[in-house]
Amino acid sequence: MGKTTKTQASNNPPARLTGAEIMWATLEGEGVTQVFGYPGGAILPIYDALRKFPIHHTLVRHEQGAAHMADGYSRASGKVGVAIATSGPGATNLVTGIATAMLDSIPIVCITGNVSSKVLGTDAFQEVDITGITLPVTKHNFVISRAEDIAPAIRYAFQIAQTGRPGPVLVDITKDAQQATAEFDFAAAGPRPHRSHPMLKVEERELEQAAEMIHNAKRPVILAGHGVIESGAGRQLYALAERAQIPVALTLLGLGSFPASHKLNLGMMGMHGESWANKAIQEADLLIACGMRFDDRVTGTLSTYATNAKKIHIEVDPAEVNKNVRVDVALLGDLSEVLEQLLPRIHSRDVSAWVKTIEASKGEVADRDIKNLPDSGRLRAAHVINDIWRMTGGNAILVTDVGQHQMWAAQYYLQEHPRGLITSGGLGTMGFALPAAIGAKFACPEKEVWVIAGDGGFQMTAAELATIVQEGIKLNIAIINNGYLGMVRQWQEFFYECNYEATPIASPDFVKLADAHGINGLTVRTRAEVAAAVEQARSAPGTFLLNFKVEKEDSVYPMIPAGSALHEMIRRPNGK
Ligand SMILES: Cc1cc2nc3c(=O)[nH]c(=O)nc-3n(C[C@H](O)[C@H](O)[C@H](O)COP(=O)(O)OP(=O)(O)OC[C@H]3O[C@@H](n4cnc5c(N)ncnc54)[C@H](O)[C@@H]3O)c2cc1C
Ligand SMILES: Cc1ncc(C[n+]2csc(CCOP(=O)(O)OP(=O)(O)O)c2C)c(N)n1
Ligand SMILES: [Mg+2]
């Protein structure tokens, strides 16, 4: 069916449209070309009107997938992702995806249908209070029961999702509002210009103080987080690090914000971070936190965290300042803007002794690096991921699930650029990878996209394989199949006396599962087979699934046990 008319979305005189048409026309005006959703009774008028608009709708297999696809679309492109669901079970199925976006500050707009306003609150068929349910996991949400309120609500939702600290917004539209008519004027429906938060102002004095702290520091470390990517502050961060010669440690979500190959890059910090990065943080006399929120996976025990360091926190959300870690100077505002103001005050300086000390602490650790272990015939997940990195030149978008494979992906697929690693950090949502990768592919069709998923998490949203086929998109899927819920098994090994309760997991034959969908695949059992298999997947015209049967009881090292200090890490035993 052709997409025929294009409704005015800018300065034309107001037209009279149904609420459903207004919904799409507003999305069109916001520049949306792609949405992910699943229909049902309470949102049928909206689906009925879709054919009139130049917006591509991807039918998902579960609404959780729609939210993750919108999220992956946003993480890959920096734009707002859109998910659509019906009332009741459609809306509740979105919740995990919304919470995932909330915890990682991802701008998505979710649109749900609801029962007619006359029966709201009567436990009508498929009625749930989705705004009540999602209140704690959205930045904001709305119930809309009049057609004339739809355009302003959606425009406001886009503004809220993207400004300040980004996040998910939900707009719940009753069925009668979708069916009624109203005048549509995109421009007139625009939200009031965004008033920035009164606290988001950096004083001259604070900038001077921060610059002085940087110039006086002998052992400074920059902590680069997700905010660098969200703010587009990579260039300014690079300039700061280079000018003042400050080493940079990155959070999981900050990976790619500073090039992995740069000599000042220390790699990931935190629970599974590089030992030298954590050691440098513990020994630092100054931490400059840029768009990161001192998550507990990053700090370990707070009472022993970087006790000798003064701290500068550059952050857009005032609620994050002094939340976990007390700081000496807070520079509140958009990171790229604050760094622009700070940079002219920073001059070059010599901290080569400090950089050398950190370098020296790498040597012995690098010897234990899994990459240097001889090929014993056993297939290690870390080797597989490192081979994929080598063969893709590090240029693919890597979308991971949650677990051991996620940490190996962070450690062994080095990120040179922002938005190359898409992963659920804060909520740690298993089942994220496959749908998020679909979203990422829609956002960046020209990019090579790899899914790295565990055998457990892949089974949570494997139904989206059918979505891939229906949409005819090309992904490369690597299942790191260790027969366990590996990350939990690792905790059981280290802290629960190897009591592997409920962690051995059976799986279908993933290659046959792919085949049932019309997707080609291959099982790989030895390292010698990896390169040819990766090449076969990459050169296949359609989606290709690789089932890597890896070492079953390998563990991610180093590891800081939850509640320990950052320098108290468990290291890979020699040769293991
Ligand atoms: C199994 C598992 C293990 C993990 N292990 C580790 C680990 O070892 N190391 C690790 O680092 N993480 C780890 N994580 C991830 C961890 O839980 C957090 O998600 C992560 O540390 C958060 O990184 P962040 O603070 O950079 O990003 P976010 O949580 O996204 O926070 C970003 C911050 O930047 C701010 N911000 C956003 N936009 C701007 C802007 N324009 N200007 C200024 N500020 C802005 C936000 O307000 C927010 O405070 C793990 C997760 C899982 C699931
Ligand atoms: C939805 C959800 N349920 C439970 C968990 C807890 N959890 C974290 S990692 C993990 C194991 C993941 O197993 P798998 O997908 O096989 O990956 P592996 O660790 O083996 O690489 C579990 C159960 C979670 N993060 N998300
Ligand atoms: Mg597993």
Image (spheres, helix red, strand yellow):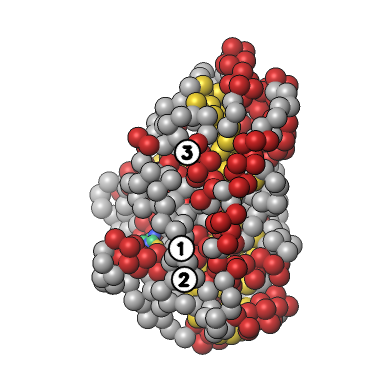
Write the residue at 63% across / 79% down. Answer: 530
Q: Residues within 10 Å of mark 2 (few under 14, many from 20)?
A: few
Instruction: Depth check: give the residue in front, 374 or 487.
Output: 374
C-alpha distance separating marks 2 and 1: 7 Å
- One can see residue 371 in this view: yes
Q: Amino acid at mark 2?
A: Lys
Q: Which mark is residue 576?
A: 2
Q: Residues within 10 Å of mark 1 (few under 14, many from 20)?
A: some
- Please report contact status of discs 2 and 1: CB closer than 8 Å, yes or no: yes
- One can see residue 183 in this view: no
Write the residue at 69% across / 58% down. Answer: 444
Residue 570 percent across, percent down from the top left: 41, 56
Dot 2: element: loop
Q: Is residue 114 left or right of residue 415?
A: left
Q: Which mark is residue 42?
A: none
Q: Is residue 348 left or right of residue 69?
A: right
C-alpha distance separating marks 3 and 2: 27 Å
Write the residue at 59% across / 36% down. Answer: 222
Q: Is residue 390 left or right of residue 299?
A: right
Q: Is mark 2 within 8 Å of ligand 2?
A: no
Residue at mark 3: 282
Dot 1: element: loop
Q: Residue furthest top?
A: 205
Dot 3: element: helix
- Please report contact status of discs 3 and 2: CB closer than 8 Å, yes or no: no
Residue at mark 1: 572
Q: Is residue 499 above or below residue 217?
A: below
C-alpha distance separating marks 3 and 1: 21 Å
Instruction: Depth check: give the residue in front, 448 or 382.
Output: 382
Q: Amino acid at mark 3?
A: Gln
